[in-house]
Amino acid sequence: METGSIADKSADWVRIFDTTLRDGEQSPGCTMNVEEKIAIARQLGRLNVDVIEAGFAASSPGDFESVRRVAEAADGPIVLSLSRTREEDVDAALRAVVKAPRPGIHIFIATSDIHLRYKLNMTREDVLDAATWAVTRAKKQLDYIEFSCEDASRSDWDFMVKVCTEVIRAGATTINLPDTTGHAIPEEFGRMFSYMREHVPGAERVIWSAHCHNDLGLAVANSLAAVKNGARQIECTINGIGERAGNCSMEEVVMALKTRHDLMGVQSRINTRQIYPASRLLSQVIGQPVPANKPIVGDNAFAHEAGIHQDGVLKYKLTYEIMKPEDIGIPSNKLVLGKHSGRHAFVERLKTLGIDTSAVDVNAAFAEFKALCDKKKVVYDDDILALVTEEARRTVENFELIDLHVASSSKTMAHAKVTMRVAGADRSQEADGDGMVDACYKAIYRITGINPTLERYAVKAITGGTDALGEVSCLVRDDGMTVGGAGAHSDIVMASALALVNALNRLKTRTQQPLKPTTDVR
């Protein structure tokens, strides 16, 4: 197997390990199919991330296949799979990445006493033996091995010294100390890295990595503290998605390193102009809008409402802006195309927006664009991105929306008639409801035979004006499974229907796969 050797340790920069496709996807409603994961992986390549954690290969046949496909598609970053210290996990992870140009494996086991006692039912000696055995087995087939002490921030430091010493001897090239529960604060988290680097023999031969969760809102701060104390890899996700309150936000930590290089002394190698396209692409794929006040990539990140701020920015931008919108890839002029624009200009704009034109039906997308131009006076970048993503959503369907007719008045209940294609056959149902969207959803439930709980429904105008392209996101839950969906259309009821159909397709796909096992070693 061709191995993904670790980058030159003498070069001082912070490696970016992106776990959007693994830890990020574990966030409720953030599931992605294989094609969507490949699209995100290609964008991660354009971002120039150093490592992509493609998934957890042993957790299900579906995850194995997605890791395998991503490993084959990504030709720049190291691609690895997460693995417990079980033999079947290690072997599955190795098989999944075998065709990657730069393969790796990420082996983990908990080291905190609370996890050993209540989750693993293992002694410290058992954990030490399992960790050493797993790294030794993986080292026989490839060079790039990351090892993680799960729940490091609540572990005994001296015990972690023993574990890290042995796995480095066995061949680990990166040591990760994760704040698995978001429990740490920056000062103590930084001290932990200093202590480990001072006391572990061979510490200088490996890259030290920080993986932080955001339960106390400190994931970025903790990651920066780790860097100040010798860590040279940060594990993060686009938009900070992840379990519970999320992971360290890639865009925030990268721009913090860049903006405060005077204090941090090191930077990443991220192509920051691809940050905004990556953020918007992920948002469209998982059907979860980026909050307006989200640092770096939110709509308000470079907006100035107060008169004093506006006056200052007009006179000199740096009075109230510590970075330039262009630095993260926000177009200076979002008004880009109109009904007289040609196919070539449309394709070039897709590339600028981070869309892989080889992965979409450009002809169909261009036809949709022309139809949208006839409805709207002005077409913006966000319109085009939503349009292309909506077209992509329709390519992998268990259920396909064919037609929708709704009627409503102030004196009668709203009525909807919906036609959908299910298993190659067209089916129609009608329903009344408390509003057009409610009636539409009831008809869709009757056609699909699925009646989930609607946990969230949100509407957003992508651009301004009454002719704006509307985007709807929803979160549905059925039989313990939560998935998100999104739809975009100039008709908000149609966008609502597309969002629900998208969610039900995801739900159908996920329920056809075996459930993922827990992360327990035993």
Image: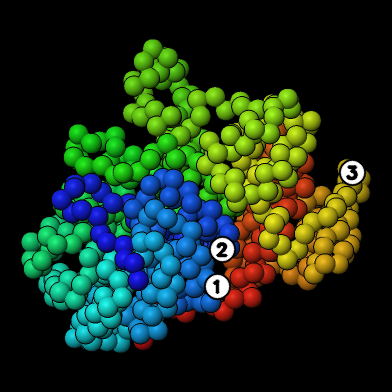
Pointer 3 with pointer 2, Cβ within 8 A: no
- The answer to whether residue 215 is left or right of residue 137 is right
- Amino acid residing under circle 2: Val
| Tag 2 residue | 34
Q: CA distance from mark 1 to mark 3?
A: 46 Å
Compare marks 1 and 3 and give the one earlier in the sequence: 1
Q: Amino acid at mark 1?
A: Gly
Please report the residue visible at 54 percent of the width from the left and 53 percent of the height from the top. 39
Q: Residue at x 83, y 55 (%)?
A: 402
- Residue 452 horizontal/vertical position (percent): 69, 67
499 left or right of 101 in image:
right
Closer-to-camera residue (489/10): 10
For disc 2, the neighbor class at 10 Å (few under 14, some 14 to 19, many from 20) is some
Q: CA distance from mark 1 to mark 2?
A: 8 Å
Tag shown at residue 62:
1
| Residue at the front extreme of this rendering | 2
